[in-house]
Image: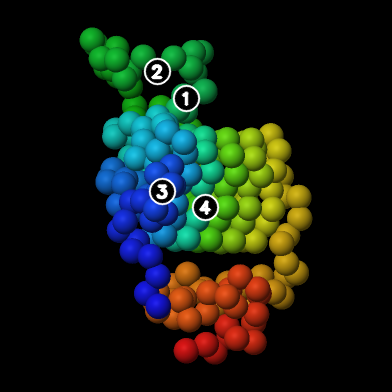
Amino acid sequence: MHGPDPQNPHPLAGHERVGFLKPLVTAENVEIGEYTYYDDPEGPAGFYGRCVLYHYPFVGDVLRIGKFCALATGVKFIMNGANHAMGGVSTYPFNIFGGGWEEGFDPAEWSAGHKGDTEIGHDVWIGYGVTIMPGVKIGHGAIIASKSVVTGDIPPYAIAGGNPAKVIRSRFDEKTVERLLALSWWDWPPEKIGRHARALGRMDFEALEGAE
C-alpha cells in the first residue's frame, strides 16, 4: 500500500479545495514536506501568495513545514520582512527605498530584529485563521487552536491557543511524548505507513514499536 501520490496537488477527487502543498509551492524560501495539505475554498494553489506574507528576498529567512501537516483555511505565516528596527528614533525603513536614503545604513542595525527561520514540525495541525509570527518553532505533533496568534515556540505534542498562544495542555504524558518522538513514524517509507495506518490512528504502540 503505497498510499496517495505526494506529488498530486489534488489528492481528494471532487474536492479541489484540498491540496498537497509540496508540488504547489516552488518558492526558494519555503520548504514543505510530503503529504502536508492546505484546505481553502479558494484553492490551495494560492497558498504562497495568500498565506506566506512579507517574504522579501533580501531578508533571507526560510519557512520550513514538515511532513503530514494539516493546515486549515486562512493560516498566515508572517516572515521577517514584516519586522522593523526599533532601536532608533523612528521605526520607518528609510534604507529600503533608496534614492540616497540607504547611504550610511549598517545592515546589522535594521536586521537586528529578525527572528530567524520559521519551523513547523511533522504531523502538526494548524487550525482556521491561525497567525504564526517570524522565527517561531512548533514541535512535532502539536495542535494550534483556531484564530490563535503564535508568537513563541510550542513544544512537541502540545495543544496551544489564544493571543498570544499559550500551551493549554500536552496531548500525552511526558513518557508517551518521548516514545512518539523516538518512533518518528513520519520518516517511514509510504509502504510501511500504509501497513500500519490504522495503528497510527489508534495509538497502538504494541503494533508500531518494532513494526516492519
Q: Is residue 129 visible?
A: yes
**Contact check, label 1 and label 2, Cβ < 8 Å:** yes
Q: Earlier in the sequence, mark 3 or mark 1?
A: 3
Who's the residue at 35% across and 46% down the image? 30
**Contact check, label 3 and label 1, Cβ < 8 Å:** no
Q: Secondary structure at mark 2?
A: loop
Q: Nearer the viewer, mark 4 or mark 2?
A: 4
**Contact check, label 4 and label 3, Cβ < 8 Å:** no
Q: Position of residue 132 (x, y in %)?
A: 54, 39
Q: Nearer the viewer, mark 2 or mark 3?
A: 3
The outermost residue toward the left is 99
Q: Position of residue 208 (x, y in %)?
A: 57, 83
**Contact check, label 4 and label 2, Cβ < 8 Å:** no
- Left or right, 62 with respect to 181, comes to left
**In this orientation, which residue lies closer to the viewer: 30 or 135?**
30
Question: To which residue does mark 3 refer?
Answer: 14
User: Which quarter of the figure has residue 140?
Assistant: bottom right
Q: Amino acid at mark 2?
A: Pro
Image quarter in which the N terminus is found: bottom left
Q: Earlier in the sequence, mark 1 or mark 2?
A: 1
Q: Secondary structure at mark 3?
A: loop
Q: Amino acid at mark 4?
A: Ala
Question: To which residue does mark 1 refer?
Answer: 85
Question: To which residue does mark 4 refer?
Answer: 70
